[in-house]
Image (spheres, coloured by chain):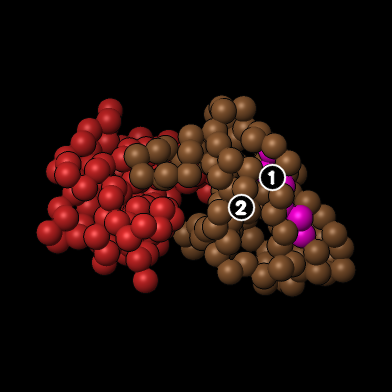
């Protein structure tokens, strides 16, 4: 059982829609991550938040907008997406940003389909 | 690219047999981790091995690391149908970027 909860599990949205993916953890972790995973590919890092501040943005297009309202919550706001953005979006957390030596806990993911 | 390459890409074995997956990488690492992913679901952390360690065990899992060859292997002994999943290695490099970079993955199928 994962202690990182993601909602919704499935989302279908049109290219003109605005939607959000949500992630929550109650493990007291101070680093949270968004990964994108296409079918049969490894996860790719999108964003890293450390102590509620954005610390890494892997050159992600601005149509993806992350937000960390508090230490337990992480959102990913979606706007004007393209069909090629359809993927599994994974949220993860760890004790702190120094990933070395830390276990990263992943949520079950949100399947996004852009039509 | 710092991404690891895993071999084989897919592996099918009979239940009860041992499964071995290999991971090769190109950069100097701080540690290497292995994750399991059931189809279309989140990743589960299996084991972490540090750059100064050569072997680590966890239950039916055995991980080895050879930093001179820049390679690691994951051995699952006495496989079970529930071990069917994709397995990814992931590395943390020594170059200040603390990004966890995943390998290409091995799809393991255990035949009952």
- Residue at the disc numbered 1: A68
The quarter of the picture where the N terminus of chain B appears is bottom left
In which quadrant of the rendered view does residue B97 lie? bottom left
- At a point 87% along the width and 68% down the height, the residue shown is A16
Vertical placement of B86 versus A113: above or below?
A: above
- At a point 28% along the width and 28% down the height, the residue shown is B59
Does residue A104 appear to the left or right of B108 in the view shown? right
Q: Which mark is residue A7?
A: none
- Colour assigned to chain B in the rendering is red
The reply to whether residue B77 is visible in this rendering is no
Q: Which mark is residue A54?
A: 2
Q: Are marks 2 and 1 in contact (CB under 8 Å)?
A: yes
The chain whose colour is brown is A
For label 1, the SS is: strand
Estimate the spatial distance between the alpha carbons at disc 2 and disc 1, rounded to whole Å.
8 Å
**Start-end of magenta stretch:** A73-78
The answer to which of A49 and B14 lies nearer the viewer is: A49
Prevailing secondary structure of the magenta residues: strand
Q: Position of residue B52 (x, y in %)?
A: 17, 44
């Amino acid at each position: 059982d994962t202690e990182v909860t993601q909602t919704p599990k499935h989302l279908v949205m049109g290219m003109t829609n605005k939607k959000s993916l949500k992630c929550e953890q109650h493990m007291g972790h101070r680093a949270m991550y968004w990964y994108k995973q296409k079918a049969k590919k490894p996860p790719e890092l999108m964003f890293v938040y450390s102590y509620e501040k954005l610390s890494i943005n892997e050159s992600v297009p601005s149509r993806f907008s992350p937000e960390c309202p508090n230490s337990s919550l992480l959102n990913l706001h979606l706007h004007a997406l393209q069909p090629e953005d359809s993927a599994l979006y994974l949220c993860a957390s760890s004790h702190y940003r120094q990933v070395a030596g830390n276990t990263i806990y992943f949520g079950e993911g949100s399947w996004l389909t852009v039509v | 690219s710092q991404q690891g390459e895993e071999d084989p890409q897919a592996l099918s074995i009979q239940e009860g047999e041992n499964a071995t997956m290999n991971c090769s990488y190109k950069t100097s690492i701080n540690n290497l981790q292995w994750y399991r992913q059931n189809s279309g679901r989140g990743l589960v952390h299996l084991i972490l091995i540090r750059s100064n360690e050569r072997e680590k065990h966890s239950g039916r899992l055995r991980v080895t690391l050879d930093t001179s060859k820049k390679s690691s292997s994951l051995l699952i002994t006495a496989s079970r149908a529930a071990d069917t999943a994709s397995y990814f290695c992931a590395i943390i490099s020594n170059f200040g970027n603390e990004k966890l970079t995943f390998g290409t993955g091995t799809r393991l199928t255990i035949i009952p």
